[in-house]
Image: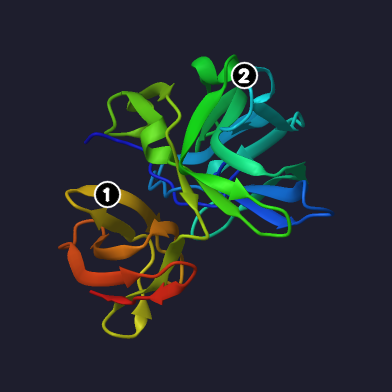
């Protein structure tokens, strides 16, 4: 089995994970910005925590000169267990005013990361360029911060793709560590929507632990894992019509076709096994 970690999302950058929210402004030259983080689902029976520490967050103004492109949003040291940021849960990162303008990139500096196993073993991970130049997450198209307006970004930290296992994955004792290569997705929440619903067994009973994925073309856009009541929430999905797949261990996969997502709205979609 190729054991990956897959997470769904309210995070630092995250659940990120992350929502970038402009909540108001005192004049037409600045606006208040909030960043939240979300996470994509991680169906790992032997992992109890996937922790990251972020000590700097910047955003790039695409129209500014080279010397003033980056605006520092936070230099606070913040730590998150990404596994806590699932099914629409988010964690707040920053709340401050920034100049109006168009912004096309968020840069996060990760200073530490580790994975904690269910037996208490801790694997400290090597950080790639994220500890020096920072992890770059491009915003395409640019997000506009306008005086008196509200803008939102969601940063989705995909745990399943960011943490990959070293060693065999047949048992806890066969796992020798993890490679860390951060994978994040960004969504403009003003132009995206969400899908929420319940995975059901026998028409009435909630089905926990089911991986629900949004399929765009031939690939998985993002996913979530149903909770103890069978409920799931997937944030930051671009406008369009998608298929959903629901995968439960040792059970035939269920596919739901033609699920439509509308900007700024919630699509309710239950799934029946």
* Label 1: element kind: strand
Closer-to-camera residue (180/170)? 180
Of mark 2 and mark 1, the one earlier in the sequence is: 2
* Label 2: element kind: helix
Q: Quadrant of the C terminus?
A: bottom left
Q: In terms of image quadrants, where is residue 160?
A: top left
Rendered view: 98 above or below 72: below
> Which disc is residue 93 wearing?
none
Q: Is residue 262 left or right of residue 83?
A: left
The picture places residue 24, in percent across and down from the top left corner, at: 76, 58
**Dot 1 alpha-carbon crowd within 10 angstroms: few under 14, some 14 to 19, many 20 or more:** few
Residue beneath the point at 21% across and 36% down: 1
Instruction: Judge whether residue 233 can be spotted in this image.
Output: no
Q: CA distance from mark 2 to mark 1?
A: 36 Å
Residue beneath the point at 57% across and 26% down: 113
Residue closest to the far right: 26
Q: Is residue 23 left or right of residue 127?
A: right
The picture places residue 202, in percent across and down from the top left corner, at: 26, 82
Closer-to-camera residue (256/193)? 193
Residue labelled with disc 2: 66
Q: Is residue 98 left or right of residue 182?
A: right
Closer-to-camera residue (95/204)? 95
Residue labelled with disc 1: 220
The picture places residue 41, in percent across and down from the top left corner, at: 42, 50
The picture places residue 173, in percent across and down from the top left corner, at: 37, 27
């Amino acid at each position: 089995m190729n054991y990956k970690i897959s997470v769904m999302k309210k995070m630092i950058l995250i659940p990120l994970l992350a929502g970038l929210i402009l909540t108001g402004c005192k004049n037409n030259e600045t606006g208040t910005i909030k960043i939240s983080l979300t996470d994509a689902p991680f169906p790992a029976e032997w992992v109890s925590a996937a922790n990251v520490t972020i000590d700097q967050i910047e955003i790039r103004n695409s129209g500014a000169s080279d010397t003033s492109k980056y605006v520092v949003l936070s230099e606070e040291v913040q730590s998150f267990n990404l596994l806590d940021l699932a099914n629409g849960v988010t964690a707040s990162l920053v709340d401050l005013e920034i100049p109006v303008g168009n912004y096309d990139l968020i840069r996060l500096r990760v200073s530490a990361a580790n994975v904690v196993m269910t037996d208490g073993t801790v694997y400290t991970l090597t950080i790639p360029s994220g500890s020096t130049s920072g992890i770059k997450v491009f915003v395409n198209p640019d997000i506009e911060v306008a005086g008196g307006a509200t803008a939102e970004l969601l940063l989705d930290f995909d745990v399943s793709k960011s943490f990959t296992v070293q060693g065999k994955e047949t048992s806890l004792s066969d796992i020798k560590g993890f490679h860390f290569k951060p994978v994040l997705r960004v969504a403009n929440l003003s132009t995206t929507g969400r899908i929420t619903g319940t995975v059901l067994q026998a028409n009435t009973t909630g089905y926990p632990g089911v991986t629900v994925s949004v399929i765009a073309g031939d690939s998985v856009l993002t996913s979530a894992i149903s909770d103890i009541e069978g409920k799931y929430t997937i944030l930051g999905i671009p406008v369009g019509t998608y298929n959903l797949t629901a995968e439960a261990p040792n059970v035939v996969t269920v596919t739901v076709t033609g699920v439509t997502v509308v900007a700024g709205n919630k699509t309710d979609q239950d799934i029946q096994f």
